[in-house]
Image (tube, rainbow, N blue to C red):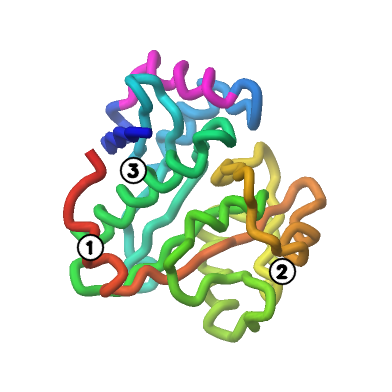
């Protein structure tokens, strides 16, 4: 499956593109074009993945420094139907890693997303110190990152030890569903209740980013 990924400024999104994005999620998370337009004002970049010329997934992101640390902050996004979701996710994440390498050469980069389905942890494959994760203690540095990300995402409340954030309003997460999700029942239980998500993050070390010298397409 050939995935084409194009990234551009959110300000360049057209009404037609916003409508196409809303159509893609109509049977799932149901983000409407008006909400997507509002979110476009809150993010800098949008990556759109296409298969055979048809939109198959998208994600809003920013490249920024949080407390001086390079970061890829992932906003809302979707990878479409489960049968193609993994390939679409790989294409979208490869594009983020390429842009991180270009923006922050020779630096370690934190990659963060809001997660309500454990399948979305597939976005962090290959990264170091993924949190939260079963069997891995959330230490003081992790809790500090949880607080920074909760503030960045505008979370209402945060359980620092579990990295569970509560929110008020629509669920603006990385919407990814896999046919073979990670077997992590502890994380599934943590996000079963409505109105909350995990603040998930991992570290893309400089050596991990080195191969991503070229854009996806």
Residue bearing the label numbered 1? 211
Q: What stretch is highlighted in magenta?
A: 13-25
Q: Distance between the residues labelled 1 and 3?
A: 24 Å
Q: Nearer the viewer, residue 76 or 158?
A: 76
* Precedes in sequence: disc 1 or disc 2: 2
Q: Is residue 17 magenta?
A: yes
* Residue 211 in picture, x, y percent from top left: 23, 62
Q: What element carries label 1?
A: loop
Q: Distance between the residues labelled 3 and 2?
A: 28 Å
Residue visible at 44% across and 28% down in the picture: 56
Residue visible at 43% across and 21% down in the picture: 18
- Name the front one of labels 1 and 3: 1
Q: Dot 2 surroundings within 10 Å: few (below 14), some, or many (20 or more)?
A: some
* Precedes in sequence: disc 1 or disc 3: 3
Q: Does the magenta stretch include residue 51?
A: no
Residue bearing the label numbered 3? 44
Which quadrant would residue 59 be assigned to in this image?
top left
Magenta region, main secondary structure: helix
Horizontal arrangement in the rendering, residue 35 relative to residue 43 (left or right): right
* Residue 169 in picture, x, y percent from top left: 68, 39
Q: Is mark 3 on a helix, strand or loop?
A: loop
Compared to residue 40, the image places residue 143 above or below, namely: below
């Amino acid at each position: 499956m050939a995935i084409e990924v194009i990234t551009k400024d959110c300000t360049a999104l057209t009404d037609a593109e916003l409508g196409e994005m809303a159509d893609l999620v109509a049977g799932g998370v149901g983000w409407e074009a008006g909400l997507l337009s509002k979110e476009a004002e809150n993010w800098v970049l949008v990556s759109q993945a296409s298969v055979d010329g048809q939109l198959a997934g998208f994600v809003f992101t920013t490249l920024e420094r949080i407390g001086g640390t390079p970061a890829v902050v992932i906003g809302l996004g979707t990878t479409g139907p489960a049968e193609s979701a993994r390939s679409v996710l790989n294409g979208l994440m490869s594009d983020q890693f390429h842009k991180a390498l270009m923006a922050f050469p020779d630096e370690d980069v934190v990659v963060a997303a809001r997660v309500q389905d454990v399948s979305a942890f597939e976005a962090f494959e290959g990264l170091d110190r993924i949190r939260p994760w079963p069997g891995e203690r959330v230490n003081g540095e992790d809790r500090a990152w949880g607080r920074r990300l909760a503030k960045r995402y505008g979370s209402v409340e945060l359980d620092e030890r579990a990295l569970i954030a509560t929110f008020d309003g629509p669920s603006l997460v990385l919407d990814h569903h896999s046919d073979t999700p990670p077997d992590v029942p502890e994380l599934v239980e943590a996000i079963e209740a409505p109105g909350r998500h995990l603040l998930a993050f991992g570290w893309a070390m400089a050596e991990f980013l080195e191969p991503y010298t070229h854009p996806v397409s």
